[in-house]
Image (cartoon, rainbow, N blue to C red):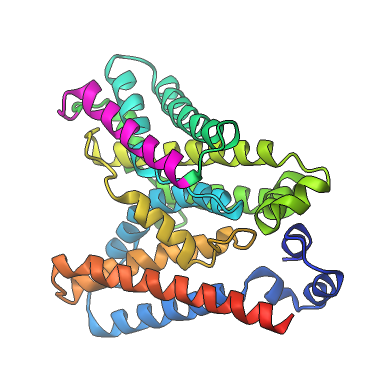
């Protein structure tokens, strides 16, 4: 929080107030705390209302199901912190997973196939970053165009048919369970937690991480202070592309098939996970911990609605209502902080 306050161009008194907060307040902000309370209350309700919610199988299935969403949301968080947006993450996941799968099917060693998928995601992120930084296109328009392009490529390359019969070694990336004590923890969950720790440390403990917050807090002030704002933006879009590719490869390996329709609509879930978790759409504020909580809340809402017999067709409306409430709270909090200052 101290770095965030300094990086966002806040006044010295505000930074001093941030330093004087207790340790637990420096690690989680008001919206994250509120979302965490809502998440815990929802979990308690579902554990009492259903017999299957807290079973080991259901818990690990939920963790596996939102792991690739959370991983892609880590990258989205970095982009939104600079007051940008990446609408192409869902298509990126599909194309990167497809690239890795096609290489694996053609007898390319699995590590090289995975590397090919990561390069694909990084290239998509690089193009997005160049469109935003060099051609000065609005992030919404640039990434919306890339959403269609990447999705079109997945259909064009496959002719609309899924790629099947993936090597077992490749599928294990998404299907393998690692024994942690007596618990069989899915490998994608371990990858998610490791990446959450690494990205969180990067944002809070490195100079580039502080620059990301500074660009989102006040881009002009960051530029005047000597920060290469365009380079920072290019970096976050490439990072977002790579993280989306990791999520896409894990998803493809879990399903055991690379379908051109994979991850359709995921961009909304990924953005929602970040926003619900406290990442401000105005930039300069948010944490990876909040994103993780937001992704977990969305998955438990979906799972809980299924267990409670809520009609499937109405579930998007429920998720949309949660997103609107989160954004409304974010804007209210911003107006309140301005009025206090």
Name the quadrant of the C terminus: bottom right
Name the quadrant of the N terminus: bottom right
Q: Is residue 306 visible?
A: yes
Please report the residue visible at 80 percent of the width from the left and 74 percent of the height from the top: 14
Q: Main secondary structure of the magenta part?
A: helix
Residue 113 placement (x, y as % from top left): 40, 22
Residue 76 placement (x, y as % from top left): 50, 50
Q: Quadrant of residue 283?
A: bottom right
Q: Is residue 190 left or right of residue 186?
A: right
In the foreground, 256 or 182:
256
Give the vertical position of 183 relative to 27 (above or below). above
Per the rendered image, the range of residues in magenta is: 140-162
Q: How many labels were placed on the picture?
A: 0
Residue 293 placement (x, y as % from top left): 48, 66
Q: Is residue 185 visible?
A: no
Give the vertical position of 36 relative to 204 (above or below). below
Please report the residue visible at 24 percent of the width from the left and 21 percent of the height from the top: 157
Give the vertical position of 270 relative to 257 (above or below). below
């Amino acid at each position: 929080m101290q770095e965030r306050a300094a990086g966002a161009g806040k006044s010295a008194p505000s930074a001093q107030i941030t330093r004087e907060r207790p340790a637990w307040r420096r690690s989680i902000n008001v919206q994250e705390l509120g979302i965490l309370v809502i998440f815990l209350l929802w979990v308690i309700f579902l554990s009492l209302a259903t017999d299957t919610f807290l079973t080991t199988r259901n818990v690990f299935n939920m963790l596996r199901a939102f792991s690739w969403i959370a991983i892609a949301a880590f990258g989205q968080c970095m982009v939104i912190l600079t007051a940008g947006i990446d609408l192409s993450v869902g298509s990126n996941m599909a194309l990167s997973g497809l690239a890795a799968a096609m290489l694996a099917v053609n007898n390319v060693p699995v590590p090289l196939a995975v590397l090919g998928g990561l390069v694909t995601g990084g290239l998509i992120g690089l193009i997005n970053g160049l469109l935003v930084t060099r051609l000065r296109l609005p992030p919404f328009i640039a990434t919306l165009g890339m959403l269609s392009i990447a999705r079109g490529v997945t259909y064009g390359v496959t002719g609309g048919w899924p790629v099947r019969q993936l090597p077992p070694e490749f599928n294990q990336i998404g299907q393998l369970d690692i024994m942690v004590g007596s618990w069989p923890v899915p490998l994608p969950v371990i990858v998610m937690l490791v990446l959450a720790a690494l990205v969180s440390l990067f944002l809070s403990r490195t100079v580039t991480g502080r620059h990301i917050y500074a660009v989102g807090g006040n881009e002009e002030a960051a530029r005047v202070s000597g920060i290469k704002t365009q380079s920072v933006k290019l970096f976050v879009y490439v990072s977002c592309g790579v993280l989306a590719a990791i999520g896409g490869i894990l998803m493809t390996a879990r399903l055991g098939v690379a379908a051109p329709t994979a991850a359709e609509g995921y961009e909304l879930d990924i953005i929602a996970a970040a926003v619900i978790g406290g990442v401000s759409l105005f930039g300069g504020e948010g944490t990876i911990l909040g994103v993780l909580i937001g992704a977990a809340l969305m998955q438990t809402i979906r799972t809980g609605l299924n267990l409670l017999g809520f009609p499937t067709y109405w579930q998007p409306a429920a998720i949309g209502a949660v997103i609107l409430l989160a954004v409304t709270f974010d804007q209210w909090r911003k107006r309140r902080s301005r009025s206090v200052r």
